[in-house]
Image (cartoon, rainbow, N blue to C red):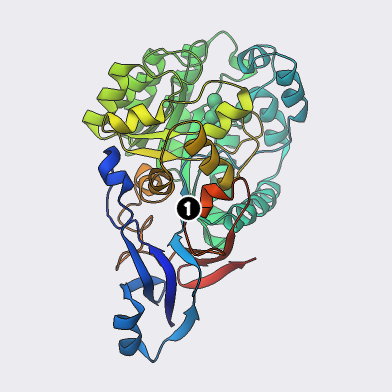
């Protein structure tokens, strides 16, 4: 099947095949006015102006995007979208002043999602997951990373990973699976963190290695300290997994520096990352993945996005969609928070949600930009200019989503 998209008011290509670091690169969006994209068998085969491409592709089906801006599909590179149950009461507790970590220490938080996730069948996780992916697609997301981490034993962690593998086959979105057995210490190992890490390394990692591409850890004071995190991630790497860290979210314990030391693909959250840690991320080319909707929901200070970019980091933005700290998969909210509170330009925010998000999940060779050879994953806005992404704040302005050359969503 061959399609040509024509007359895009702005074709925002975000052109590139790797992470973009620093302000100059992140502000360069590679815009073509009156742009056209040729798509064949799910891939982009040509990009240029309508004038130059239309005469050469008269045989293609035409999609006219006059008066609309067209961007690469968004990449939500950090979510926990496979889970059972909900924790609405925690949101009210936090509004009354109880902190996220206090709730966790009282047996709420991540551990409160473990029982309903263990009780759910794989089919139930798939069905709920499918609805969540549908909602993401409507926001223009075409690639999503998803983490296990609510099973916290071999059987249930694998169940979460298998649910994601099924959704990868059955749903148009691309799902990148991450193993996160070190998300919390389960009740049966309470007070025995070291033994739990031993169990992960001995049993869970070998079983998860075939199903998960990444390994992530909640590297946090009183959860998995840096020493346990290092030990676990080194073991994961020796099994061929790529690395991610939840780093310096609540208390600065050097998780950012650890991500650089281990050359992780990304370090995420970073609300309390040190100057040294930020410099090390830039030096090692670790993507700094910022999750401003979580800071918003927890009433925590935002990560220093502006400073990170000015220090030469490649910054990505993601939702952190999960049932506790951030029960939202809103992309418009991310554009608003990043530009209003973290000091990013709208161009940097677009780069952060496209090519840099793709780099954070090691997909910059096939997703995150409108370049020949990449997947034909495109978002059509109902306005002619990408500036509407934050100007029309908190509103979903996505009109059409094309996934691998086919219309997968239409408003
Ligand atoms: O990224 N901080 C650890 N993990 C998630 C929260 C998961 C949950 O609360 O269920 C996060 O914020
Ligand atoms: Fe997270």
In the picture, residue 41 is in which quadrant? bottom left
Q: Residue 156: x percent and y percent?
A: 60, 36
In the picture, residue 190 is in which quadrant? top right
287 versus 95 height, above or below: below
Q: Is mark 1 within 8 Å of ligand 2?
A: no
Q: Residue 304: x percent and y percent?
A: 41, 25
Residue 183 vs residue 54, the one in the foreground? 54
Q: Residue at x 48, y 13 (%)?
A: 251
17 versus 108 height, above or below: below
Q: Residue at x 61, y 22 (%)?
A: 299
Q: Residue furthest left?
A: 283
**How many other residues sit within 10 Å of disc 1, few (<14), some (14-19) or many (≥20)?**
some
Q: Residue 393: x percent and y percent?
A: 59, 46
Residue 276 vs residue 49, the one in the foreground? 49
Q: Where, quadrant-wise, is the N terminus in this rendering?
A: bottom left
Q: Residue furthest bottom?
A: 59
Dot 1 corresponds to which residue? 387
Residue 262 in sight in this render: no
124 versus 66 height, above or below: above
Residue 195 vs residue 149, the one in the foreground? 149
Q: Residue furthest top?
A: 191
Q: Residue at x 31, y 24 (%)?
A: 278
Q: How many marks?
A: 1
Q: Where, quadrant-wise, is the C terminus in this rendering?
A: bottom right
Residue 155 in sight in this render: yes
Q: Residue 348: x percent and y percent?
A: 38, 43
SS state under label 1: loop
């Amino acid at each position: 099947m061959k399609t040509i998209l024509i007359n895009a008011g702005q074709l925002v290509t975000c052109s590139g095949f790797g992470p973009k670091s620093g302000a100059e690169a992140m502000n360069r969006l590679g815009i073509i006015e009156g742009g056209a994209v040729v798509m064949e068998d799910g891939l982009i085969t040509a990009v240029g102006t309508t004038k130059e491409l239309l005469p050469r592709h008269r045989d293609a089906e035409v999609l006219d995007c006059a008066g609309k801006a067209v961007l690469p599909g968004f990449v939500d590179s950090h979510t926990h979208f496979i889970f059972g149950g909900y924790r609405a009461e925690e949101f009210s507790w936090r509004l009354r002043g109880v902190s996220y970590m206090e709730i966790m220490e009282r047996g709420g938080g991540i551990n409160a999602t473990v029982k309903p996730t263990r009780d759910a069948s794989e089919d139930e996780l798939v069905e709920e997951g499918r609805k969540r992916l549908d909602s993401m697609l409507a926001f223009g997301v075409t690639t999503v990373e998803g983490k296990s981490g609510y099973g916290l034993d071999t059987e249930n962690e694998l169940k979460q990973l298998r649910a994601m593998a099924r959704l990868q086959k059955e749903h148009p979105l691309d799902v990148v699976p991450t193993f996160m057995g070190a998300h919390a210490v389960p009740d049966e190992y309470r007070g025995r963190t070291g033994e739990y890490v031993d169990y992960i390394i001995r049993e869970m990692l070998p079983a998860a290695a075939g199903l998960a591409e990444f390994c992530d850890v909640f590297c946090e004071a009183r959860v998995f300290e840096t020493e346990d995190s290092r030990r676990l991630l080194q073991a994961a790497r020796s099994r061929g997994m790529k690395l991610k860290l939840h780093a310096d979210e609540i208390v600065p314990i050097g998780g950012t520096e650890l991500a650089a030391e281990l050359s992780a693909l990304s370090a995420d959250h970073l609300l309390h990352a040190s100057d040294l840690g930020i410099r090390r991320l830039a030096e090692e080319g670790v993507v700094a993945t910022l999750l401003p909707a979580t800071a918003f929901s927890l009433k925590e200070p935002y990560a220093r996005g502006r400073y990170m970019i000015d220090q030469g980091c490649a910054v990505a933005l993601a939702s952190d969609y999960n049932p506790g700290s951030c029960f939202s998969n809103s992309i418009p909210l991310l554009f608003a928070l990043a530009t209003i509170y973290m000091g990013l330009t709208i161009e940097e925010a677009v780069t952060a949600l496209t090519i840099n998000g793709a780099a954070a999940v090691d997909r910059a060779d096939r997703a995150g930009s409108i370049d020949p050879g990449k997947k034909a994953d495109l978002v059509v806005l109902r306005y002619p200019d990408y500036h509407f992404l934050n100007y029309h704040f908190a509103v979903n302005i996505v009109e059409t989503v094309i996934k691998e050359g086919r219309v997968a969503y239409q408003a």
